[in-house]
Amino acid sequence: MTLPLLSALLAATAPPPPSILTAADAFDRAQLAQDEMRMERMILDSFIFIDGSGKRQGKHAFIAGWLTPGDKYDPIILIDRTVTPLGRDAAVVSAETKLCGTSDGKPFCSHIRFSDTFVRVDDEWRVAYVQVTRIKD
């Protein structure tokens, strides 16, 4: 058996990668749970984050923002969630939500729309880009 044929057979029998929505849900859970290790694995090193003020940041600043001591996040409800495929190995997942919780015991709540861009790398969905837009209530 030739190597290309063997590779094709192995690829055909391998379990499919998780769906984009499964990956998007896992990414949301990692953020809300302040799971630094999970975020580190899911986010590409070349990650770009555009925050609600329009400022460009990278992977480490994004993760650090979720890990602020004294911050706790409430569960979120996603509204108007969309998935825009960008071929087989990329997609943008977008939704509106209210990100609420407490910071040093004081309540906060931000109404936002976000777009998370995922790319498939080695059969895993990874986060390449996030943009957040604040919505005025």
Image: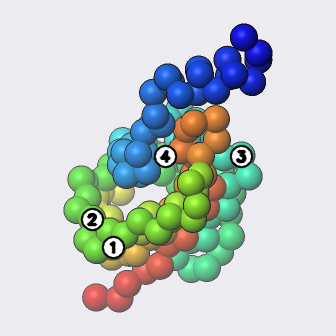
SS type, badge 3 = strand
CB contact under 8 Å: marks 3 and 2: no
Q: Is residue 42 above or below residue 68?
A: above
Residue 137 screen position, x and y as percent: 28, 88
Q: In x, y percent, where is residue 39?
A: 53, 41
Q: Closer to the camera: disc 4 or disc 2?
A: 2
Q: Which circle's residue, 1 or 4, is located before the other in the chain?
A: 4
**Residue 76 in view of the camera:** yes
Check the image and name the residue furthest to the front. Answer: 1
Crowd around label 3: few <14 · some 14–19 · many ≥20 (10 Å): few
Type of amino acid at the residue the image marks with label 4: Leu
Vertical placement of 29 versus 51: above or below?
above
| Spatial CA span between label 1 and label 4 | 22 Å
Q: CA distance from mark 1 to mark 3?
A: 26 Å
Q: Which residue is mark 4?
A: 67
Distance in Å between CA atoms under marks 4 and 2: 22 Å
The answer to whether 74 is drawn above or below residue 69 in the figure is below
Name which of mark 4 and mark 2 comes first in the sequence: 4
Label 1 is placed on what type of residue? Answer: Glu
Q: Which residue is mark 2?
A: 78
Label number found at residue 96: 1
Residue 112, quarter of the rendered image: bottom left
Of label 1 and label 2, which has the lower sequence position? Answer: 2
